Amino acid sequence: RQLGEMLKEHWDLVLECGCRPESRRLIEASGWPFVVIDAGVPIPPSSAANCCGRISIAIDRALGECIRTCVRRNVRRVVQFHLEGSCFDAASRMRQVGMEVESIRIPFCDSLERIAMCALRQTKKFLSRRRHSLPDLIFISDDQVARGVLTELLARGVRVPEETQVVTLSNRGFGVLWPTSITRLEMDPKEHGMAVAKASIAFLETGSFSPNPVLGSVWKRGKTF
């Protein structure tokens, strides 16, 4: 109802990010020019005449470089700590290149602190089952999950050997999650916001939304622990 009332006003450009089908229909029917933002999971394109472009946010854009690095380092065994409901899951692509992946699911909670605590408890269970050796790669597909996993490793006094890689997804600019610069797939929300703003301004000035920006993670090398 609120969206319908807002669309009765005049808009030069509407940015649609992860709308429900009924919201998409309202935006299409309004006649106002709109751009679809794919926030992680690709949204089916619109055939409406007032859809003037799309912006893709590809969280896994740097995953290819991560996997190539792992292949060069002969990574075979992987444990992935994965937040349930997250659009970013690396397990299938890792399995495609012959890696053995154990995916540990972290339940989605209503606060960042609870997500970190759930990850801490799941890490404790994981370590109790792996008393003798760690896998070749510990891959963490959410930055708040990383807080819990790394905190528990530190609390247990677990020394991550040189042959074990630690890689995490990280959102730059959302506060320091860990004092050490860990190897990561880094998202930069501020940079992405600026790119969306520049593309929108260019559309308002020229009437054309092209090229369609693709924003996503960047591979950043750091320390394992």
Image: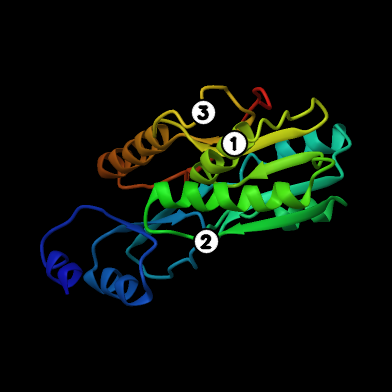
Residue type at mark 1 is Leu
User: What numbered label is drawn on residue 6?
Assistant: none
Q: Residue at x 14, y 64 (%)?
A: 6
**Residue 26 locus on image (x, y percent):** 26, 73
Marked residue nearer the N-terminal end (2 or 3): 2
Instruction: Tell whether label 3 touches label 2 (CB within 8 Å).
Output: no
Query: Distance from label 3 to label 1 (Cα)?
Result: 8 Å
User: What numbered label is drawn on residue 107?
Assistant: 2
Q: Which secondary structure, mark 3?
A: loop
Q: Which secondary structure, mark 1?
A: helix
Q: Residue at x 46, y 56 (%)?
A: 38
Image-quadrant location for residue 168: top right
Q: Is residue 217 visible?
A: no
Quarter of the image that includes the N terminus? bottom left
Q: Which residue is the site of mark 1?
A: 150
Up-down: is 156 above or below 80? above
Give the camera-side residue of 155 and 102: 155
Quarter of the image that includes the C terminus? top right
Marked residue nearer the N-terminal end (2 or 1): 2
Residue type at mark 3 is Trp
Give the camera-side residue of 32 and 129: 129
Q: Which residue is the site of mark 3?
A: 178
Give the camera-side residue of 174 and 215: 174
Q: Is residue 23 left or right of residue 133?
A: left
